[in-house]
Image (tube, rainbow, N blue to C red):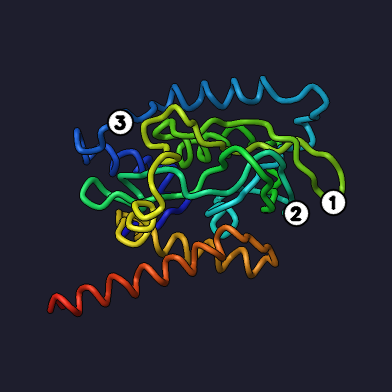
């Protein structure tokens, strides 16, 4: 099992592991040129009132909270409105595999999300964002967007990643039972989807963030595991 570190991203091992899956991956990966172009385009589309010379705030709502892998100088509680934290992205590498696809978080439309904002200073901004893009945008499943967020009561542009609902891995139409199944069985080179879920929920609690969606999902996953265990016991399987 691999660990997601800055060294792992810098060495491009992330892409190499995904490429090793070949046709089983079933979707193309972005090249470094595409990633760099997306970074430059995103910075060029920054709100006019944003002074990039003061740094860029990156909004974390999932694994970025407990494993940011960013060179940042400030971390603050932040809220974005109009988007909600959801397990709505199917993955075949990382927290899933072609044989055991999993689910990871994305921001989907609706509601609001409390998370943490990390300020990346300008002196190494493009390099830091390039590694962030290698982490989040390698399969092109997200849309990098400037969201109007709130930090310390002040309206602040936050850079974040919103689900691309047109990508084939968006699971908005998948029934809840299928999602629970993928969360319980998904497993890849970085570990399981269930571990990803528990780490995220634990980190939110540690940060004092209450996420009703994840709290309710914990109960549903617990019930689904009990049902599966009972069925396996009834069938005589170990």
Q: Tell me if mark 1 has few (under 14), some (14-19) or many (20+) residues whose alpha carbon lies within 10 angstroms of its own.
A: few
Residue beneath disc 3: 27
The reply, left or right, for residue 42 in relation to residue 55 is: left
Location of the N terminus (image quadrant): bottom left
**Mark positioned earlier in the residue sequence (1 or 2):** 2
Q: Position of residue 102 (x, y in %)?
A: 34, 51
Which residue corresponds to the image point at 86% horizontal and 44% vertical from the top-left?
Answer: 154
Mark 1 vs mark 2, CA separation in Å: 8 Å
Q: Tell me if mark 3 has few (under 14), some (14-19) or many (20+) residues whose alpha carbon lies within 10 angstroms of its own.
A: some
Which residue corresponds to the image point at 52% horizontal and 21% vertical from the top-left?
Answer: 37
**Mark positioned earlier in the residue sequence (3 or 2):** 3
Q: Tell me the SS state at disc 1.
A: loop
Residue beneath disc 1: 152
Residue 76 is marked as 2
Mark 3 vs mark 2, CA separation in Å: 35 Å
* CB-based contact (under 8 Å), mark 3 and mark 1: no
Q: Nearer the viewer, mark 3 or mark 2?
A: 3
């Amino acid at each position: 099992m691999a660990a997601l570190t800055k060294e792992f991203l810098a060495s491009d091992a992330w892409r190499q592991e995904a490429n090793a899956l070949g046709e089983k991956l079933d979707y193309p990966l972005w090249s470094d040129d595409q990633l760099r172009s997306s970074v430059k385009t995103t910075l060029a589309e920054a709100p006019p009132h944003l002074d990039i010379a003061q740094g860029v705030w990156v909004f974390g709502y999932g694994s970025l909270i407990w494993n940011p892998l960013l060179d940042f100088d400030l971390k603050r509680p932040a809220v974005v409105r109009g988007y909600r934290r959801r397990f709505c992205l199917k993955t075949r590498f990382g927290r899933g595999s072609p044989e055991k696809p999993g689910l990871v978080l994305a921001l989907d439309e609706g509601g609001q999300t409390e998370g943490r904002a990390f300020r990346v200073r300008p002196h190494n901004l493009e390099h830091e964002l390039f590694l962030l893009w290698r982490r989040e945008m390698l399969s092109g499943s997200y849309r990098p967007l400037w969201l109007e967020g709130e930090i310390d009561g002040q309206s602040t542009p936050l850079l974040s990643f919103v689900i691309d609902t047109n990508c084939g891995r968006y699971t908005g139409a998948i029934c809840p039972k299928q999602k629970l199944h993928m969360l319980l069985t998904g497993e890849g080179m970085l570990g399981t989807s269930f571990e990803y879920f528990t780490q995220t929920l634990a980190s939110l609690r540690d940060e004092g963030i209450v996420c009703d969606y994840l709290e309710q999902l914990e109960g549903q996953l617990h019930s689904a595991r009990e049902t599966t265990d009972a069925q396996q016991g009834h069938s005589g399987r170990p």
